[in-house]
Image: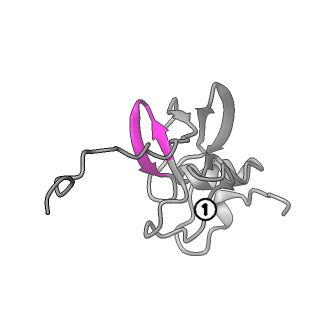
Amino acid sequence: MVSRRLPATSDRIVPGTEDAVRVELDGTPVDGLRGQTIAGVLLGSGVLAWRRTSGSGKPRGVFCGIGVCFDCIVTVNGQRDVRACQRRASDGDRIETQHDALPRPVSEPDPLEGRS
């Protein structure tokens, strides 16, 4: 997939201005336009994945694009589990990729053990 950014003035629904925003993804600057979602900024810059699955560590980015799934979650300015497809990017946002390991099973004593 080749990313490309269309001029905001060519948006047929809500023509916008070319006001730039700069966010950081894991410390790397990424440029976008005012009004874009975080996912839009990342995709427009060629970043396709910014989370890894807990089980197999497979890359994830946007799946549904409407806030139903959780494939695009990121940490924004310290707030975890933000859906990148729903949050508009603000100049200076610090975005971090997320990867949470699967929880370890808790071994509890069997309450029925030793009963007849």
Q: How is the image coloured?
A: one colour
Residue 9 highlighted magenta (yes or no): no
Nearest to the observer: residue 53 or residue 95: 53
Q: Main secondary structure of the magenta part?
A: strand
Seen in the picture, residue 31 relative to 67 is either above or below; the reply is: above
x and y percentages locating residue 45 in the rendered image:
74, 47
Nearest to the observer: residue 31 or residue 81: 81
Q: Residue furthest left?
A: 116
Residue 77 highlighted magenta (yes or no): yes
Q: Residue furthest top?
A: 27
Mark 1 lies on a secondary structure that is: loop
Residue located beneath label 1 in the image: 62
Looking at the image, which residue is at 52% across and 42% down? 101
Nearest to the observer: residue 51 or residue 34: 51
x and y percentages locating residue 82 in the rendered image:
42, 48
Seen in the picture, residue 14 relative to 77 is either above or below; the reply is: below
The local crowd at label 1, few if under 14, some if 14 to 19, many if 20 or more residues have their Cα within 10 Å, is many
x and y percentages locating residue 107 in the rendered image:
34, 44
Q: Quadrant of the C terminus?
A: bottom left
Position of 109 with respect to 19 (left or right) is left
Which amino acid lies under the numbered mark 1 shown in the image of this protein? Val
Q: Quadrant of the N terminus?
A: bottom right
Seen in the picture, residue 14 relative to 92 is either above or below; the reply is: below
Residue range (magenta): 74-83
Q: Residue furthest front?
A: 116
